[in-house]
Image (cartoon, coloured by chain):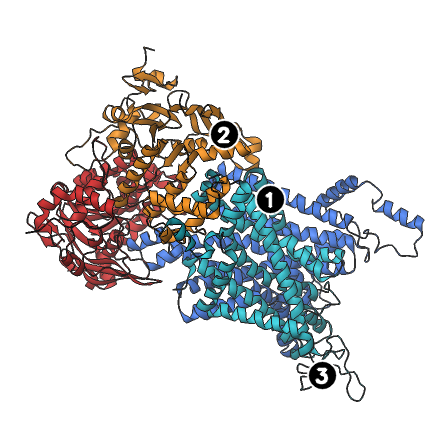
Amino acid sequence: MALLDVSSLSVEYQSLYGPVHAVRGASLSVSAGRALGLVGESGCGKTTLARALIGVLPRGARVTGGAVRVDGTDLLRLPPEAVNEYRWRRIAIVPQAAMDSLDPVQRVGDQMVETMVLRGGLTRDGARARARELFRLVGLEPERLRLFPHELSGGMKQRAVIALALALRPQLVIADEPVTALDVIVQHQVLRTLRDLRQALDLSLLLITHDISVVAHLCDDVAVMYAGRIVESGPVAEVFARPRHPYTMGLRNAFPSLRDSQEHLVPIEGYPPDLASPPRGCAFAERCPFAVPRCWDEDPDLTPFGDGLSAACHRAHEAAMLRDHAAEAFERMARDKTPVAPPEAK
Amino acid sequence: MPILEVDRLEKHYPLHSGLLGSLVGARRFVHAVNGVSFALDEGANMGLAGESGCGKTTTAKLILRLLTPTGGAIRFAGADIAALQGPGLLAYRRQAQFVFQNPYEALNPRFTILRAMLEPLIVHGIGASATDRVLRVAEALQQVHLDPPEAFFMKYPHQLSGGQLQRVVIARALLVGPSLLVADEPVSMLDVSVRAGVLNLMRDLTRRRGLTTLYISHDLALIRYMCTTTAVMYLGTICEIGPTAEIIEHPKHPYTQALVAAVPDPDPARAAPAVEITEGMPTPLHLPPGCPFADRCPKVMEVCRRIRPQLQPVEGVQVACHLYGEAH
Amino acid sequence: MSDAERTLALPPRWAQATATWRDALQTLVVVARRDRFALAGLIIYLVFLVMALLAPALAPYDPLALNYLPDGEVAANLPPSTRHLLGTTNLGRDIFSQLLYGARAALVVGFVAALGVVILGTIVGLVAGYYGGWVDGLLMRAADVAFGIPFLPMAIVLVAFLGPSIWNVVLVMVLLLWRDTGRIIRAQVLSLRERSYVEAARVLGAGHARTMFIHIAPNVLPLSFLYGSLAIGWAILTEASISFLGFGDPDVISWGFMLQDAYNSQALARQAFHWFVPPGVFIMLAVMAGFFISRGYEELLFPRLRRR
Amino acid sequence: MKRLAFILSRLAQTLLVLLVVATILFLIFRLMPGNPLVAYLDPTFTEEMARSLRRQFGLDKPLYVQYLVFLQNAVRGEFGNSFFTREPVAQVIWNVLPNTLALTLAALVLAYAAGIVAGAALAARRGTRLEHWGIPAVLATRAAPEFWVGMLALAIFSFSLNWFPFGGATSPGSIYRSIWAQLFSLDFLHHLALPALTLALYLQGLPTLLMRNSMLEVMDEDFITFCRMRGLPERTIILRHAARNALLPVVTAFALGIGYSIGGNVIIETVFSWPGLGRTLVRAVAAKDYPVAQAAFLMIAVVMIAMNFLADLLYGVLDPRVSDERR
């Protein structure tokens, strides 16, 4: 059984212009000891999803449906105090704004000790010793526990927040864009620390990022999110080598690669839909060169295709053929600004 | 003759430590740019790579005369731009244009797109009549694939997406007919799926017009896609410069090696060998007399801490590193 | 359609710079619609405006004239009645008429001083924030000094020296109160200066003056407006205080003057609430109106404080 | 070391401001229309007597000499004699200074204690009826003229109900062994109550509104969200993390608030006939008693600037980022 199992989760929040459907029936699962990468563009709902998992949504946002099961228990059905049994003890999070996530007027060490004393039932001395141990674990000198957050560099703050996430020995850590604000070299080193920690502590990881390369680097599985839904998921190597959803195909050609000199980038024409009024059919139809009339009317479900692969596309069964045409089709769409006629399906 | 020549460029900021501090303490300086030299031929393009704080954006702003250098010279078509004033400066501003990192901030929120685009025409007195100017704006918008242009005229920046805004910024930069274009992280604020469109557009437009282009980015993959030449900056100096392919495939300077190795690859099969260096660039405050990278360098030698290495040709590129020098 | 035709089909406003003033008024309407308190503030100002304009027509008596009873006695210390709606002062002056005339002083002082404060503060803030360096240092040290001067004592001393005139009161307020607006606008300009569009204006060839007044100023004017509506309140309050202390213009009837008159004429001991309650309420309403409007405006500008 | 440098640089700035304010004061009293002696000189004085008086007050010397003498005297606390009572000015000032400090500090402490609690409560009750009407009510206390509130208080509590004295700081005829005995006597506190409460009512508006805004802002910060994610108890989050950070701007306001409150004392002291610096200033200006006016003004400025400086230091202690700030 999966450690974390999210099914058909929906979250909406109130804006000045009415409800925004940030997450629209997203499903994913993380097995014990595995790392899942959740990739998507900004505004696709991945951060809202993460905050729903830890049970701290922004003001005005609420879960409107679905389930978040940890070891089979649905957290959304538990009373608030019972959720605390899971929060931080089973699932911890390294939030997106890790740089600003520490109280600026308190020493880093005090914040760690506070968490361990109030949430983990440790004594102050025990907590202090554990804080030193955790700092060493994430590659920081224990002396730095005495510093204030503003006295740490960006990479150090990120590591301190990771140490804080590990404080109560959780099984699953959610890391929301853990390296986005960091420089390339620091980024690389923090990612490696995460990978080492995963092995050393047998952690499960849910890594949220917009950067496909980071997922490829660190994760076993990947889930691709678009406009509040998971459109494709499966083992990393399989999904990137043989994508079944046109969005994933498009993304593959939209990134420059450092080690490929002869490539030609192909953009995905258009922009993600406005989630205040999501389209009736497939949210990607507007930007998809392969859209057929059915796509505009009917939102496809995430359907399993064996080997742990799933995709939400009406034409996923023709994926191999679509893949061959993908670069050319996206290119033509970008040039003509109209959906190209889909290759004939038989 | 190169159209743009940057010669031992320096920019030092005095560090403020209050009224009293400036009275008692010695004045300290941040060495943002510390002796950068390179030259660009007409129509050439170059990428300036490096981590944040390495001085790449300061270099760009110096070239655009948004800042004035504290040392060295920038020559555009042979003339030093530091001395430009009044009409001379205005003429230079028609020649050198900038594409900003953050398109959401590069357009005045209180100006409509049309008004924002008319601004450079008004300032430079381009266009015979109001109608003529509007037609020029329409044409420029069409060139960046914002079609039909008049649909965008009365829009305010917050009504457009990031990709559209960056296209407007590019169109506005090209409106005055520049010969040099500097782009500072032109797509880093954009969604991944629209980045490729903006990059392709910039590549097409600059090539077709034969523009001299300088791309500034922390993203080596982007530079590889856009540029034939690359310079890698570290702590205000260029540590390696040469043809892009050579620099990325066979980096010479230990810093370049670390930088290249740190870039994750979308293809999990091609993991790069790791290069160990310590985390975090120091602030450019106390510059050591020797190589600026010495403190983090895995291959540091005794000479590195004494003598600052100069750029010298090594296998088709130029490298500032004692590893490749004559015996010391 | 040809390009030229398309251009001509554009609305005539196409070349307009920015519609700052129209924006400000439109925003005011939006604010009033969203926020009932802001609407109340606007209505209060409108009522006072009508009072001030029509005071001679509405007032039943000359506010400074001594009134007599039919038997020839001075009509002093009368309680409210139909003849004298709010009674009379100890010298037999009609309190209701004084109250109406008082709106004139309040509005003139409030609006003129606020305008002066905002104009001076905005210009100082723009120049200091934009140029930075020693210009900024000098102007901000000047603001420090202005903050180091005790406001009301200085106002009293200056008015005492310059002579008790309503315009001196206004002048003193402008000289001393620009500091708040100046600092806020400077901070805003400093943050705007970091925005690329200000650099963009420079790269595109705009000079310093053009950058400051065409590109930056429209973006700080909403803030000036906000501080302006607050300053109206402060100015009315200050004028009342100065009058109460006896340094006001003796030829102008203001609410502060009425309160001073009441205080010095033992109205408290006589429990003449009809005399000293109404002017205080009017001052309070005028100041609150400014607060309400600025608050509604603030919530629109800084949505983080929004109540929802 | 860094902290010492911070304190010294603030001190230097404070002294500079004080010097400039003193200079402005000097210039106002020397250059304004009407020589300071005009009020003193009787038209019946002969030219000879006037000249000797000018010499006596040092007014025959060049301006810069007068300025230096003024500064020297100011530092030594020498302000000459009152034009009217002939008392030494220093004596006049020292007599009333404790009253002003007692009134101001009592009101400030009350106002900030109440304001911080009320502001936090308003923030916690966001979107409720309490907030909807509470804020306009607080605004009303800021908008109501202090002297008018004082008049109402006097009319109701003193003249009508007879609970409090009509004014002054002590009952007529009271004699105390020392200034401290006076300040802590019941009689003094009885006199102090009404003016201090009136002033506090006016002053609490600023901390209340600021604390509320600041709390709301802090509660939206990422580090508070992170505390929630860690499952910390709500009490801990609000008291240990949110309130402490939210207090920072309130402390800054305290510094500026002191300025307004000391200035505002002029009003409160006049209404309640409180023998303090403000009332002394008003009476001296009205009577054209320039030596007293000048000294009272300078003293008010000194108290205000000194308190600003202390508030600055307090801020440096509360926020570790400030004293390290490098710009």
Q: Colour of chain D?
A: blue
Q: Secondary structure at mark 3?
A: loop
Residue C95 position, x and y percent, is: 69, 77
Amino acid at pointer 2 = Arg
Question: Which quadrant of the figure contains the C terminus of chain B?
Answer: top left
Q: Mark 2 sits on what residue?
A: B28
Amino acid at pointer 3 = Leu
Between B105 and C76, the residue placed more toward the observer is B105
Q: Mark 3 sits on what residue?
A: C78
Outermost residue to the top:
B327
Between C81 and A232, the residue placed more toward the observer is A232
Residue at point 52% right, 52% down? Answer: D252
Question: Which class describes the residues within 10 Å of circle 1: few (<14), some (14-19), or many (20+)?
Answer: many
Q: Colour of chain C?
A: cyan
Q: Colour of chain A?
A: red
Outermost residue to the bottom:
C71
Q: Are the residues tagged 3 and 1 within 8 Å (C-beta)?
A: no
